[in-house]
Amino acid sequence: MPTDSLLPSSTPLERDAARVNAGHGKVDPGEIAIGVIIGRTSEFFDFFVYAIASVVVFPKLVFPYADPLTGTLLSFTIFALAFIARPFGTALFIAIDRRFGRGSKLTSALLLLGTSTVAVAFLPGHAQIGAWSAILLAAFRIGQGVALGGTWDGLASLLALNAPADKRGWYAMIPQLGAPIGLIVASALFTYFLKVLSAADFLDWGWRYPFLVAFAINVVALFARLRIVVTPAFQTLFKSRELQPTPVVQAIAEEGPKIAVGAFAPLASFAMFHMVTVFPLSWIFLFTREPPSRFLLIEVVGAVFGIVAILVSGLLADRYGRRTVLAATAAGIAAFSGFAPQLLDGGPAGELVFMISGFIILGLSFGQASGPVASSFSLANRYTSSALTSDLAWLFGAGFAPLAALALSTHFGLIAAGGYLLSGALATLLALWLNRGLASPRSN
């Protein structure tokens, strides 16, 4: 692709990516998949680094005046701010996309994400600046949320559009692999520092290194994604309006009911997502004597099973249909909610069973949770509507999940956390039932 075909406002990184990719022909789905996995892994690594710190660092660093439970609940409240801010970030960066192009949007969004993440790494504690520590943490978290709204680059949609007709389920699961991979890397990194450092050193400076690593990974991911964004194949789809950004107000006005259904269809998956990642870590850390490093290793083992389950979800979806897989796994999550959370009080064996079985069910569900009604959006609104659907799904399904699950289980027992998970499963089944009249054959 000639570099002079880029917009005058193209960023230096975008121009560099174009030069590296000059002369490159059609991009096949395999190449797009690599870019998608790299991008999603970097986002989820950021996510889990912050999530783990919300349990093992921020309650002591930012809220030392509160008891451990209250400090963790306050930490989870700030954790949720990113999900609230994300739709606003989408609106902001869609405007940047329309005015300056996708490369400029992606570069500025990831710059904001990296800056907010690095800022967390240098956060002073309450002992140094008092209440300003919590205020700054909230501001940085909002910055991360706004930035995440701008990281929607359309690569997942491009991947779906380039996937063979008989392998749409397989290619739909590829972006979801970033979640367990990001969790494995983040958990392993925190485990290392927790094991080699004293508690005082870890709380003083050790926890900060994963946030610095997250910034480095973002730089690599940015260039990898720009390499795809500036390819002729992607630009052709963009110009044909298959991936044209439209104003958020227009997308909501024309696609509102479909966006709403799309946001609630994966609710079971996203609620389950936190029930086997963030919430159990907080429960073990607060209510057992088990060191967090040991449970983080259990999460790594569970995430490996999650990767396998996500891969299997692609095969099942291509054979039985994506909506069928989502409905079946939502029913499985409903059954899981009735007994599995109590396993967290069953010692190491119960914890291992909970995590492995939970990640298997999560992988099968989460693997097909990305945009189950995206193909029913009009071509003109698909890009913006898909971004909004993702934002709202994360907000309603995941944003408050750790806070709600921990608060409910503390007051009413672990069975109450299962009730919260059950509500997500029921919402998914209802949304899929409503989607019967909205989904096109391609979405099945």
Image: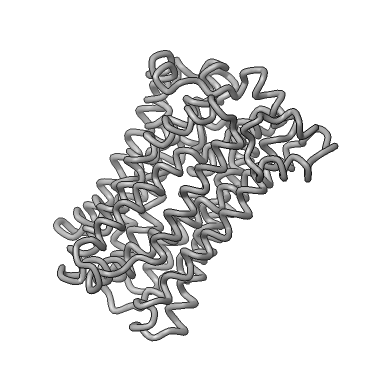
**Left or right, 72 with reference to 366:** left
* x then y, percent, for residue 206: 43, 76
Pick the front one: 424 or 395: 395
**Left or right, 100 with reference to 199:** right
* x then y, percent, for residue 366: 49, 44
Pick the front one: 141 or 42: 141
**Left or right, 239 with reference to 422:** right
Quadrant in the picture for residue 255: top left
Pick the front one: 60 or 140: 140
* x then y, percent, for residue 266: 42, 36
In the rendered image, the quadrant that contains the C terminus is top right
The correct choice, above or below, for 196 with respect to 305 in the image is below
Looking at the rendered structure, the number of numbered marks drawn on it comes to 0
In the rendered image, the quadrant that contains the N terminus is top right
Outermost residue on the front side: it is 8
Colour convention of the picture: one colour
The residue drawn where x is 50% and y is 20% is 246
The residue drawn where x is 59% and y is 33% is 102
The correct choice, above or below, for 114 with respect to 438 in the image is below
The residue drawn where x is 51% and y is 19% is 381
* x then y, percent, for residue 420: 26, 46
